[in-house]
Image: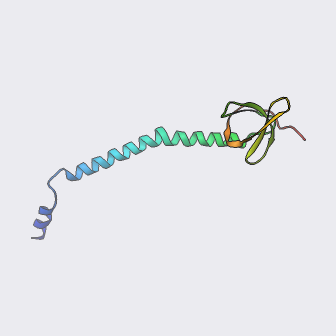
Amino acid sequence: MFMTLIQQAAPAGGAGTAVGGQFLMLAVIGLIFYFLLIRPQSQRMKKHRAMLDAIARGDEVVTSGGLIGKVKKVTDDELTLTIGTNQDVKIVRTMIAEVRNRKSAAND
């Protein structure tokens, strides 16, 4: 008697496999998003952070605004760039887009 009640309460064929198939497709889509979007972006961020940490005095850099200058002074969050004769600009370190010419650090 108990088994007949369970069999009557269970849905008729296919419902269990449909849910399993939907979960499998959701997992596949999640993996595709991870490998095509999330992972490459985190690798780019890691490379950019390493580039910013390696900036030293004397490097030629390009800002995200397009200014090109030579690093005159480096602090924790800011850089002082020389962009022309006696023209110094302070910028936030995270706004550096590219380091062009790496120079050995100048001795003071």
Is residue 85 or residue 31 the one in the foreground? Answer: 85
Residue 60 locus on image (x, y percent): 76, 31
Task: Please tell me in which quadrant of the rendered image residue 5 appears.
Answer: bottom left
Task: Please tell me in which quadrant of the rendered image residue 8 appears.
Answer: bottom left
What is the total number of numbered labels drawn onto the structure image?
A: 0
Asked if residue 50 lies left or right of residue 106, the reply is: left
Q: Residue at x 41, y 45 (%)?
A: 30
Q: Residue at x 14, y 54 (%)?
A: 12
Is residue 31 or residue 81 the one in the foreground? Answer: 81
Residue 94 locus on image (x, y percent): 67, 42
Q: Residue furthest right?
A: 108
Q: Is residue 81 visible?
A: yes
Could you tell me which quadrant the N terminus lies in? bottom left
| Scheme of image coloration | rainbow
Asked if residue 72 lies left or right of residue 28, the reply is: right
Q: Is residue 101 visible?
A: no
In the image, residue 3 above or below residue 106:
below
Q: Residue at x 44, y 41 (%)?
A: 33
Asked if residue 71 lies left or right of residue 6, the reply is: right
Q: Residue at x 59, y 39 (%)?
A: 44
Could you tell me which quadrant the C terminus lies in? top right
Residue 101 locus on image (x, y percent): 75, 29
